[in-house]
């Protein structure tokens, strides 16, 4: 703990791993995410002293303890609010928020909404496992309808929230998705998130081996992955499949997406949509795609930077007048009178 | 009205001398009574009187015109002697409509003066106010000196030339009434004229009309249009020490105190996280206008985000502050536990209001003492302090910052709706005399452990992100007493619980011993108060002491922990009486802490204690 890395020393992934015993269940998707973040930080040349991980409550929220950066394990759902305060005190810090589907979309849903619309310069990583793990398996706000759990023995009856739809609806300027075990893609997305100024919202599909094992297998299983995953890239056509033989287009005369095969039935490559990550409408359609009719969209789905909250806050502070620490001026403003 | 027999002459008409006067301006919530009162306050302060004010407004922003629940009032007590309360009984009531008369007449002393706008006493308004008969036509007002003028018509005449609509013109009525009151007490109009020029800079015709109404009201008194029995009065300057003065509301004093406190701590940034709530919002407004002094205000999405943002700011090395009222403080409870367990500095301001639940948001109460001291899950101690007057808020705010930063703890600072809104003159302190308590952020990685405590204060080091070599993790999970790593060890939790308690208890050794405000250090009876009951308790004790009663006044700033000598001090009295604007909270804390038979005196009407009711209670105890 007392080793100070010099500013020029290159830090490897292991330099970001703390000596604390990781206490997630064996096989938990969180391990893969932890590893990806260690690697991403190393590749980004991040400084430990300048990096802060802030989490709420839940399995994912233990994350900061496994980092050698600054870390704050806070209370359920409130990490975005605490992170906002950190940025208002010191906008120069690189702040990452670690949350989950319950933490970020249920008890902390309000804070998630507002931090996104404000566009505070934070990286928010939402580990979505569609279940409450730490409290032993109750259904969560992202659980699909009909999820059987200790609290819903006959199946849940409420409709799930789609995390990225929520984020886009709240005004997020960066929305991305990745799968826990797909490390290379995850690292790329993490690096893009870090490079984006403003709130970067990133959903990671994370498998809970104990309470919700295989919930994402419908698109993460190796056998179905090529057919059920669409990895988007800005400026490139929306193609997927083992040989990238299938594409996504807007069905003529509708505002619906459909799968097509260029070269068949009069469909050409020109019919296939080209990904434009600055297009909010396209992003909204992409995040709504669901198997089996459509593949799951992954990667940077939307990135369209705008001024950050703290940039505007401090610009207003500068515009309000010359900074001063003169308490005498403060107390003597306005009308005074002298008694002699 | 305290009267002196000495007549004085001033100007063309003889003026009578008064030692002190209580005026209440009352009207519809849209009649501008708060502005009228504020301007009278400013002119009175500039005239050199001591004063205290009490704004009393409805929860409705614009209740239906003419209704009793829409009545807004502003009371000012000013005098040539020490003024400590907004006054028990009203000497002069300015009632702009029948509803204002209906609501406020009970507080007017017999023989007092009531100024009425007869133009507003229409059958419709009388009915809305609930008068069965016109009080101008029966004996209702017989016990009072009645000044009934058609203020509406006089105002319309005065502003005729400015081409305002009837509605706009009638909105100048308050300035006419203000003008008359300023004449009656020999006050200047200059500051008000300047204020009108600023306020209506973009609407010159409105500015001119208001000024004309103000001058017309003044001239009405000056030019013998008044009934012969009505004269002007003189209230001599208060005998106050030399220096530069200003008027200040409790909220302003508090906001400035927070900035001065941060400055004293050597912190360059104050981050206020707040969510609008009555009566705490004015602090957000005051601080939002002070950005050049290192203030960042964050209007959060809710009370929880407000406190959490402040905690985050403190974690990152700024002074985190959050402000609210009781219901909002309830929502912040869990986050306060986080600040307690992660041992981060935080100032939590609670401008208390009448409750529970929504209660009466615009009415004052001091019923959140239990909440402040006990209102969190688990053993979660934090210091609780309270200010007792609007100007006292400045010093207490600085003290809150000192305790928060020196002890790495959230501090709850209790004010109330009265303190937040009331104003009084203030001798601006010399900046050189303000305390200094610079914080030392930890920077040395050698031997750094996040939870190793300072042997004297038991505070952990403040190590902020951005500092190389101090990277560490903190959180709400119980942590090892040294490394801060997660620990479920049973002995460690025992040790940490004891350490958190000992740290806060130790503050008793770092605050002044409790002094007796008035009276002897032992005797038959002591009246113990806290918060905004200071004025009425002080004056009541003074009054009974003048009659020879053996009674003392103790007023607590430190409510948790109590000053170290408090038990000893209270033991020196035969009886302890604890008046509170709640159902008995400090009294049970004193009883349980010191095992003494303290007696409570509760008032929860939404109005401050009157000096007379406290004096009666004191006499009864002394006789009993």
Image (cartoon, grey):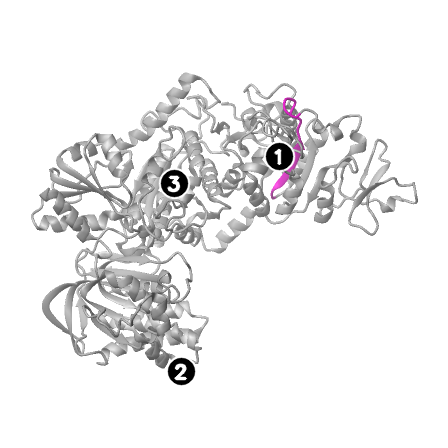
Q: Is residue B114 magenta?
A: no
Please state, as top left, top right, bottom left or bottom right, where the N terminus of chain B lies in the image: bottom left
Q: What subunit carries mark 3?
A: B
**Predominant secondary structure, magenta span:** loop
Give the alpha-carbon distance from disc 1 to disc 2, as whole Å.
Answer: 67 Å
Res. B90 image quadrant:
bottom left
On screen, residue B118 versus residue A11, left or right, reads left
Give the alpha-carbon distance from disc 3 to disc 2, as whole Å.
Answer: 53 Å
On screen, residue B416 versus residue A219, left or right, reads left
Which of B414 and B342 lies nearest the eye of the viewer? B414
**Rendering coords of residue B595 (x, y %):** 21, 30
On the question of residue A41 being in view, the answer is: yes
**Rendering coords of residue B221 (x, y %):** 24, 77
- Whether the residues at callouts 3 and 1 have beta carbons within 8 Å, the answer is no
Which of B529 and B243 lies nearest the eye of the viewer? B529
Point out the residue furthest to the left here.
Answer: B548
Q: Say which mark, if any, is on residue B161.
A: 2
Q: Secondary structure at mark 3?
A: strand
Residue range corresponding to the magenta coloring: A198-212
Which class describes the residues within 10 Å of circle 3: few (<14), some (14-19), or many (20+)?
many
Q: What subunit carries mark 2?
A: B
Q: Say which mark, if any, is on residue B347.
A: 3
Point out the residue furthest to the front here.
Answer: B132
Q: What subunit carries mark 1?
A: A
Q: Say which mark, if any, is on residue A126.
A: 1
Res. B503 image quadrant:
top left
**Rendering coords of residue A18 (x, y %):** 56, 22
Question: In the rendered image of this protein, does residue B242 appear above or below residue B99?
Answer: above
x 40%, y 36%: residue: B345
């Amino acid at each position: 703990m007392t080793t100070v890395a010099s500013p020029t020393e290159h830090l490897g992934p292991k330099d970001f791993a703390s000596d604390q015993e990781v206490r997630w269940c064996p096989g938990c998707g969180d391990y893969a995410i932890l590893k990806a973040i260690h690697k991403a930080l190393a590749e980004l040349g991040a400084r430990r002293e300048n990096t802060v991980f802030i989490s709420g409550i839940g399995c994912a929220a233990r994350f900061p303890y496994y980092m050698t950066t600054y870390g704050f394990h806070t209370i359920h759902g409130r990490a975005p609010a605490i992170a906002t305060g950190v940025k208002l005190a010191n906008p120069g810090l690189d702040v990452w928020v670690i949350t989950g589907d319950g933490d970020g979309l249920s008890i902390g849903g309000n804070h998630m909404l507002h931090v996104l619309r404000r566009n505070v310069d934070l990286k928010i990583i939402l580990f979505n496992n569609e279940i409450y793990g730490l409290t032993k398996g109750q259904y969560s706000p992202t659980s699909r309808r009909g999820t059987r759990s200790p609290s819903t023995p006959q199946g849940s009856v409420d409709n799930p929230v789609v995390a990225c739809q929520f984020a886009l609806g709240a005004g997020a300027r960066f929305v991305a998705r990745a799968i826990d075990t797909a490390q290379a893609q995850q690292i790329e997305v993490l690096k893009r998130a870090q490079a984006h100024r403003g709130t970067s919202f990133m959903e990671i599909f994370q498998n809970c081996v104990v309470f919700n094992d295989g919930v994402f297998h419908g698109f993460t299983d190796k056998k179905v992955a090529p057919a059920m995953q669409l990895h988007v890239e800005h400026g490139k056509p929306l193609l997927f499949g083992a040989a990238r033989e299938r594409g996504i287009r807007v069905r003529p005369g509708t505002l619906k997406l459909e799968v097509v095969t260029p070269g068949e039935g009069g469909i050409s490559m020109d019919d296939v949509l080209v990904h434009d990550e600055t297009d909010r409408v396209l992003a909204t359609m992409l995040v709504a795609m669901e198997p089996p009719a459509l593949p799951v969209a992954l990667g940077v789905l939307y990135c369209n930077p705008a001024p950050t909250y703290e940039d505007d806050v401090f610009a207003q502070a500068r515009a309000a007048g010359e900074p001063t620490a003169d308490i005498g001026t403060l107390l003597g403003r306005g009308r005074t009178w002298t008694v002699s | 009205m305290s009267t002196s027999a000495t007549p004085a002459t001033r100007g063309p008409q003889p003026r009578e001398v008064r030692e002190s006067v209580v005026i209440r301006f009352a009207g519809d919530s849209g009649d501008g009574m708060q502005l009228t009162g504020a301007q009278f306050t400013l002119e009175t302060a500039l005239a050199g009187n001591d004063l205290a004010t009490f704004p009393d407004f409805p929860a409705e922003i614009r209740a239906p015109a003419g209704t009793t629940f829409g009545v807004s009032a502003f009371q000012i007590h000013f005098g040539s002697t020490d003024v400590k309360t907004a006054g028990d009984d009203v000497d002069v009531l300015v009632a702009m409509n029948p509803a204002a008369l209906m609501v406020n007449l009970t507080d007017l002393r017999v023989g007092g003066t009531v100024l009425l706008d007869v133009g507003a006493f229409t059958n419709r308004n009388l009915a809305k106010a609930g008068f069965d008969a016109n009080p101008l036509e029966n004996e209702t007002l017989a016990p009072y000196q009645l000044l009934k003028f058609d203020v509406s018509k006089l105002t319309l005449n005065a502003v005729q030339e400015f081409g305002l609509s009837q509605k706009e013109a009638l909105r100048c009525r308050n300035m006419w009434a203000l003008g008359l009151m300023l004449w009656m007490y020999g006050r200047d109009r200059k500051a008000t004229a300047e204020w009108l020029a600023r306020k209506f800079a973009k609407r010159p015709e409105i500015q001119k009309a208001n000024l004309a109404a103000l001058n017309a009201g003044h001239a009405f008194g000056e030019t013998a249009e008044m009934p012969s029995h009505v004269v002007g009065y003189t209230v001599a300057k208060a005998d106050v020490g030399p220096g530069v003065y200003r008027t200040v509301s409790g909220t302003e004093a508090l906001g400035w105190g927070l900035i001065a406190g941060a400055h004293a701590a050597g912190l360059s940034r104050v981050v206020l996280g707040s969510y609008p709530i009555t009566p705490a919002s004015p602090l957000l407004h005051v601080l939002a206008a002070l950005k050049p002094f290192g203030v960042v205000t964050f209007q959060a999405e809710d009370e929880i985000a407000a406190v959490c943002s402040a905690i985050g700011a403190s974690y990152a090395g700024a002074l985190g502050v959050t402000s609210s009222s009781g219901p909002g403080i309830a929502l912040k409870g869990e986050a306060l536990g986080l600040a307690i367990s992660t041992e981060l500095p935080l100032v939590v301001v609670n401008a208390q209001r009448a409750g529970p639940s929504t209660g009466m948001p615009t009415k004052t109460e001091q019923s959140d003492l239990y909440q402040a001291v006990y209102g969190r899950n688990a053993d979660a101690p934090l210091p609780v302090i309270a200010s007792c007057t609007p100007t006292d808020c400045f010093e207490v705010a600085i003290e809150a910052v000192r305790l928060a930063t020196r002890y790495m703890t959230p501090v709850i600072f209790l004010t109330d709706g009265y303190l937040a809104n009331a104003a009084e003159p203030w001798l601006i302190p010399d900046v050189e005399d303000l305390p200094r308590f610079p914080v030392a952020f930890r920077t040395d990685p050698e031997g750094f452990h996040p939870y190793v405590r300072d042997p004297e204060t038991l505070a952990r080091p403040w190590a902020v992100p951005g500092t190389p070599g101090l990277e560490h993790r903190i959180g709400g999970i119980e942590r090892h007493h040294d490394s801060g790593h997660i620990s479920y060890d049973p002995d460690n939790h025992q040790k940490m619980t004891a350490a958190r308690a000992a740290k806060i208890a130790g503050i008793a050794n770092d605050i002044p011993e409790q002094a007796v405000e008035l009276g002897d250090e032992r005797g038959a009876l002591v009246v113990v108060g806290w918060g905004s009951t200071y004025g009425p308790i002080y004056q009541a004790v003074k009054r009974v002491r003048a009659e020879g009663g053996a009674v003392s006044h103790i007023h607590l700033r430190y409510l948790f922990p109590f000053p170290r000598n408090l038990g000893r001090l209270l033991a020196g009295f035969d009886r302890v009486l604890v008046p509170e604007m709640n159902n008995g909270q400090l009294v049970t804390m004193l009883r349980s802490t010191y095992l003494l038979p303290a007696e409570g005196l509760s008032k929860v009407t939404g109005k401050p204690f009157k000096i007379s009711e406290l004096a009666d209670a004191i006499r009864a105890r002394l006789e009993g």
